[in-house]
Image (cartoon, helix red, strand yellow):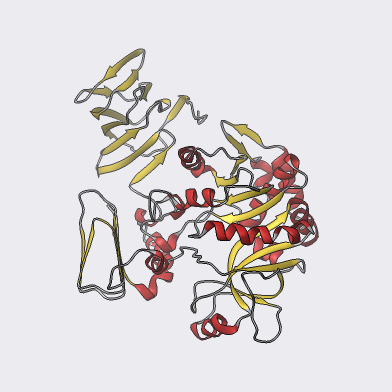
Amino acid sequence: MIYPVILCGGSGTRLWPMSRRSYPKQFSKVFGDKTMFQDSILRFEGPGFAAPLVLANNDFRFIVGEQMATLGVAPTALVVEPTAKDTAPAILAAAMYLEQIDPDALLLISPSDHSVPDAARFRDVIARGVPAARAGKIVLFGVQPDRPETGYGYLELDVGGDAGLDAATGAPVALRSFIEKPVIEDAENYSVSGRHLWNSGVFLFTARTIIAAFQCLAPQIPPLVQRAVSLAKRDLDFIRLDRENWDEVPAISIDYAIMEPTQNLVVLPYDGKWSDMGSWQAIWREAPRDADDVATFGSATAVQCHDTVLRCDTPGQELVGFGLDNICAVAMPDAVLVADMSKSQDVGKLVEIMQAKGAAQATEFPRDHRPWGWFERVSLGQNFQVKRIMVKPGAALSLQSHQHRAEHWVVVRGTALVTVRDKVFRLGQNQSVYIPVQARHRLENTSPENLHLIEVQTGTYLGEDDITRYQDVYARA
C-alpha cells in the first residue's frame, strides 16, 4: 500500500490577503466547493492507496480534522507537530510512525496546497514509480514545463542529447542537479531543453529507505525524532509528538537535508497540468476566464478589463474593476491588495513590510477559527470589543472565566444552552445574558443548526489570553 503523507505547513504569504499565517491557503476554497487540502486528500484515494497520514501544527489540528470529517475520510493518523521544524523532521517522523504500522510502508510525500486537475493521470505516474521505490530508490516527480516559469525550482536530468523524455511511458531517470528559481532567460532555455522539469516536491520512497538516508546524511536528526515519535501521546483524535525532544530537532528542509546530497534519487516525469498555486498569477492561470482573460471570484465585476483577476468573498461587499490590465485585486473585510500581476510572486515581501509596521492584517484574519466554530471582530474601541460568534451543532466552548472583562451575549439565530455560575438555562433568538467579571460560564449548542450570537466585551483588558479554562471537550483545559 502507498501511504499518502500530506504536509500542512507553510504560511502561504504570496496569496495574501486570502492566505495568512493564521489560516493559510490550503484550507481555503480557491476553486469549487472543496479546499486545496481536501483536494489533496481526495487526489490519492483509490486502489493501492491507504488512508492518509496528515502532518499539521498545533494551531491547525482542529481545522484539519473538521475538513477531513466533512469528506468522510478517516486518516491513518493525524500527527501534530509541537512547533514547525520545516519538512525534513516532519517527513522523518511520518516514516518512523508508519514503519511501526507497516515495515514495508511506501510513503508518498505531498504538499497540501497544489493543484493537479487530472488526479487519475497523476496516480498512474505514481504507480510507475513504485518498482523503483520498492528497490530502494527515492523517486521525485517532475513536471514537464509548458512555459518559462521563474517561480518554480527546476530539475536537470541526466539524459543525453536533445531527444528529451517520453513522459507517457518513460522510466525514472537519474538527476544531474537541482536548480533554484531561475531568471527569465534561463527559464526560457529550460522550458524547451527537453531535459529540465519543474520540481513538484512530491516524493515516493519506502520508510526504510528514507530513514537510512537520514542516518547517513543527517545523523543528528533521527535519534531526536525517534524519541519524539516513541513518546508521542494520543490527544482526542491526534497523535502529539513529544515536545521536549521535538524542540531539540533542528529545522531543515528535506531538500537540503536529503535530496540534494543523496546519490540515490531518480526522477519520473509527469506531463499533465500542475501548479503549486503559489501566486495570484498562478490562480489566474488555473481559473476559468472570460474572452478578455479576466477571472472573477465572488461578488466581483470586471468592466473593460484584460488579463486580470478580481476576488471578493465578503458578503455585502462589491469589488468592481474598470479598465484594468494585468492586475490582481483581492478584497477582504480588513485588507485589500491591488498589484501588477507580474509582481504577484513578491507579495510575500509586502507581508514582511506590514509585519514590520505592526499591522495585524499581515498574519491574522478578522475571523478566528476554533474547534467549536469561529468568531470575528466587528468593532474594537477603548475598553470594549464586539464580536460575532458561530457555534456548530453539538459543539461547546470551555467552562471558563475572565479576570478583566465582562460579556453580554445576544442570540441572533439558533438556541444556546448557557451556564453562568450555578445556573443553566436556554436562550432563543433575541434573548440575551450578562456574564460578570470572574464568573464561570459556558456556551453550548445542543440544537441541529448553527448558533449565531453577538458578544459585547467590556473591561480593562480584552486579549484572548484572559481565559481560565476549567473543563473543555477539546482537551485545552
Q: Residue furthest top?
A: 422
Q: Nearer the viewer, residue 157 or 59?
A: 157
Question: x, y (%) of residue 343?
Answer: 38, 74
Question: x, y (%) of residue 169?
Answer: 66, 69
Residue 414, placed above or below residue 22 = above
Whether residue 252 is visible, yes or no, is: no
Q: Residue at x 59, y 56 (%)?
A: 110
Q: Is residue 213 left or right of residue 285?
A: right
Question: x, y (%) of residue 225?
Answer: 71, 47
Whether residue 163 is visible, yes or no, is: yes
Residue 369, placed above or below residue 282 = above
Question: x, y (%) of residue 279?
Answer: 42, 66
Q: Nearer the viewer, residue 105 or 318?
A: 105
Q: Residue furthest front?
A: 169
Q: Is residue 103 left or right of residue 168?
A: right
Q: Residue at x 41, y 33 (%)?
A: 372
Q: Quadrant of residue 386?
A: top left
Q: Is residue 202 left or right of residue 406?
A: right
Q: Is residue 99 left or right of residue 358?
A: right
Q: Quadrant of residue 350?
A: bottom left
Residue 440, placed above or below residue 476 = above
Q: Report how many numbered discs are placed on residues in the image.
A: 0
